[in-house]
Amino acid sequence: MLPTGGAKDPATIRPSCRLPAETRSHVSVLRDFERRLGGLVEGLFAKTFRSGLQPVELAKRVLREMDAGRTVSVREVWAPNRFAFAVSPEDAARIEQMEGALRQELAQVVREAAAERGWGLLGPPEVTFEVDASLGRGEFRCQASIVEGEERMEPGEARERGVSLVLLEDGRSTRTFRLGADVVTIGRLPECDVVLADPGASRRHAEIRRDGDRYEITDLGSTNGTLVNGRYVGTAELRDGDRVTIGNTTLEFRRD
């Protein structure tokens, strides 16, 4: 049950409001957020958020509050890690059906955004929801703050952006392989650049070659073949978001 609270923040964001232009790193974080929740699109997610407040609006507000509320010192930047949302009774009833998953994914947005920008977090990300009867459907408020906790994320260098293969398991990103070399091999052999513990993968299954800004994947005569977006290929150019299937393994090609 979501707690009930009164109005605390005079700034109200409606779904129709436009946020400032986002950086490329923010676009990447939002894209990953939507993809992680995408596994629920055919079920509860589609039914729950067909109208009214959309989860991506909450994620956008988190990124906005992190930008606005960060504390900058000579050498370090600390970002807000606690986000208290107030939502309408109607939206609260929908959120309650998947509140745990939504809080978890929004917390991941905080971690990824901080890592992308090299910002620190003084405590673990925390997201809470409460009901505000003064709000209408689609309206919400957010209060962001920096709260100390046992789990800290120290500031560091901004994450290098480039091209990567992301291992997907049950629709979730579980591991990222950066593609820094001109030729990247994929297979079961330990010498491969991307090693797959998949009996359906050949020892040297496929390779990805870089030609300027283009990336092509080539099947290396594997037993079970290589699929891109569900189609068998010999050689194919990879574009952002393409999914490569090798055996029972799914890898997503991403440009940051």
Image: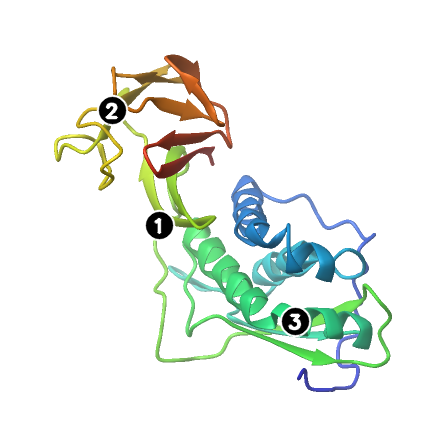
**Mark 3 vs 1: CB contact within 8 A:** no
Distance from disc 3 to disc 2, alpha carbons, whole Å, reads: 43 Å
Distance from disc 3 to disc 1, alpha carbons, whole Å, reads: 38 Å
Residue kind at label 1, given as amino acid type:
Glu
Residue at position x 42%, y 19% in the image:
232
Q: Quadrant of residue 58?
A: bottom right
Left or right, 90 with reference to 198: right
Q: Position of residue 103 (x, y in %)?
A: 56, 69
User: Looking at the image, is mark 3 or mark 2 earlier in the sequence?
Assistant: 3
- Dividing the image into 4 quarters, which one contains the N terminus? bottom right
Distance from disc 1 to disc 2, alpha carbons, whole Å, reads: 34 Å
Which residue is tagged 3? Answer: 97
User: Looking at the image, is mark 1 or mark 2 earlier in the sequence?
Assistant: 1
User: Looking at the image, is mark 3 or mark 1 earlier in the sequence?
Assistant: 3
Front position among marks 1 and 2 = 2
Decide: is 89 above or below 237.
below
Tag 3: Cα neighbours inside 10 Å, few (<14), some, or many (≥20)?
some
Decide: is 236 above or below 204.
above
Left or right, 42 with reference to 159: right
Front position among marks 3 and 1 = 3
Residue 157: image tag: 1
**Mark 3 vs 2: CB contact within 8 A:** no
Q: Position of residue 171 (x, y in %)?
A: 47, 48
Tag 1: Cα neighbours inside 10 Å, few (<14), some, or many (≥20)?
few
Residue at position x 14%, y 32% in the image:
189
Which residue is tagged 2? Answer: 205
Residue at position x 12%, y 31% in the image:
191
Residue kind at label 2, given as amino acid type:
His
Left or right, 204 with reference to 33: left
Tag 2: Cα neighbours inside 10 Å, few (<14), some, or many (≥20)?
many
Whether residue 214 appears in this view of the structure is no
